[in-house]
Structure formats: structure tokens, C-alpha cells
Amino acid sequence: MNGIMPVIGNIKTAKQLGRRGSYKYVWKVCESCDHSRWVTIDNSKNGGSQICQICNAKRNLLNVKHPGIYPRIPFVDRFWAKVKKTDSCWNWCGSINKVTGYGQIQIDGKLELVHVAAYKLTGSLIPEGRELDHLCRNRACVNPDHLEPVTHRENVLRGINVCATNAKATHCPRGHPYDSTNTYRRPDGGRDCKICQRVRANNFRLSKVGVTSKAY
């Protein structure tokens, strides 16, 4: 902060305020302490957070010492309060894994992917051996209509990363087919071309006696 008092209604991200998470904050008058503070913006039906983090922390502490003074909001309500619905995607506005891009939330002390949690909260079951694929390709989306249970292999094949590209390949980089007779399956699940393997092995032997390598 630069020492200049913000104007009521100003909005900043958590990063701009030096805080963790992906929330946005608005400078407003806290309805509990009547002080102007940064209040979390959420999407709950009652218009979002109305109290500052200091007052919220005090409420949580009172709940520990005197349960029932401020009834705890049910998990399902807290979950959907962090979802911003559009005409297509339902975007998660809570914590997002910076590496994978998937939303995450703690349930009973364990981190769970939010699109999986949303799928279950809407009454859908994920069959054994299946995982959810984002049909919309938006990893922050929790719209159950945009999620489909598929096998891990199908999920990889539908992707657009390097692994997906390699998995879809029908020929090796040298142009030899990945068919039943010319494909070696590595222990890690990858594929190797048997023709290329033989040529590499032969060229290695030739190099030992000073003979020029053969082309693939």
C-alpha cells in the first residue's frame, strides 16, 4: 500500500494486496465494525461478503468457544458461493492450482478438485475406473454439463498437450508405422519403433569399428 486511502468501491486482487489466493476485494464499510476495510468479493445470493476478515476471524473464534452464536454456513452453500455462473461455463473463483490450472478445495482436511466436487454435489456419480474430462477445455469450469466420465487413456487422447499428441501418433518420427509388429511397449507405457531401435543398435556397433552409420 502506498499510504493513500482507497476510495469506497475500489477493487483489488489478492496479489495487489499482497495476499494469497485468487479472490478479489472491495474497499467498503464493514457491517460489523463500521470501519472501512478490504472485504472479500464472492458470489453468494445475499450479495457477497458484508464483513471484513478481522470481524470474520472474531466470529470464527467465538464459534469455537461458544458454538451456535454464528451458525456455520453449510459446505454446499460456501462451495457455490465461489462459483460464477455464465451462459456456458460455471467458473470457480476460489483457490486454483498454479501448476495444473484446476480449482481445488479442502474437504475433511483433504484437497479435492472442485469440478469433481461439483459433479458429486449435483448428484452425479463417477463410475469406477473413470475420471472427469472437461468438454469445454476450461479447467476452472465446474458445470456438470461440461464434464464427462471417461477412461484415463481417453482423457489423454482428447488433450492438446505433448502427451496427447504422442498418444495420437500412428507413425514414429521417422515415418515407420506404430502397428502390432513394429511397436515396442516400454514399461512406462510409452512406445518405441522397432525398426528405429534396430537401426540405432546397428549404427552403434558400426561406430565402434569406424564404419559410417546407415540411414534410417
Image (spheres, grey):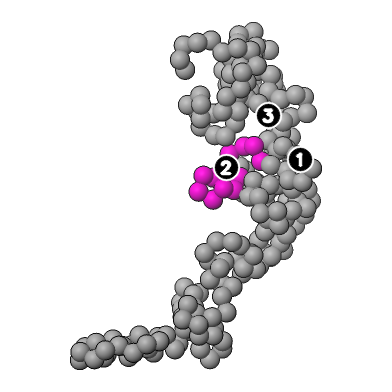
Q: Earlier in the sequence, mark 3 or mark 1?
A: 3
Q: CA distance from mark 3 to mark 1?
A: 15 Å
Residue at left 58%, top 39%? 95
Residue 96: assigned label: 2
Q: Quadrant of residue 155?
A: bottom right
Q: CA distance from mark 3 to mark 2?
A: 15 Å
Is residue 74 highlighted in magenta? no
The three-letter amino acid code for the residue at tag 1 is: Thr
Q: Is residue 46 left or right of residue 153?
A: right
**Does 3 sit above or below residue 152?**
above
Secondary structure under the numbered disc 3 in the rendered image? loop
Residue at left 74%, top 29%? 44
Q: Is residue 52 visible?
A: no
Secondary structure under the numbered disc 1 in the rendered image? loop
Residue 150: assigned label: none
- Residue 137 versus residue 75: which sits nearer the camera? 137
Q: Which residues are magenta?
A: 92-103
Q: Position of residue 118 (x, y in %)?
A: 71, 47
Q: Closer to us: mark 3 or mark 1?
A: 1
Q: Earlier in the sequence, mark 1 or mark 2?
A: 1
Query: Could you tell me if the residues under marks 3 and 1 are in contact, i.e. CB atoms within 8 Å?
Result: no
Mark 3 = which residue? 42
Query: Could you tell me if the residues under marks 3 and 2 are in contact, i.e. CB atoms within 8 Å?
Result: no
Residue at left 54%, top 80%? 171
The three-letter amino acid code for the residue at tag 2 is: Ile
Q: Is residue 75 left or right of residue 104?
A: right
Q: Closer to us: mark 1 or mark 2?
A: 1
**Does 28 sit above or below residue 63?**
above
Mark 1 = which residue? 86
Residue at left 53%, top 91%? 181
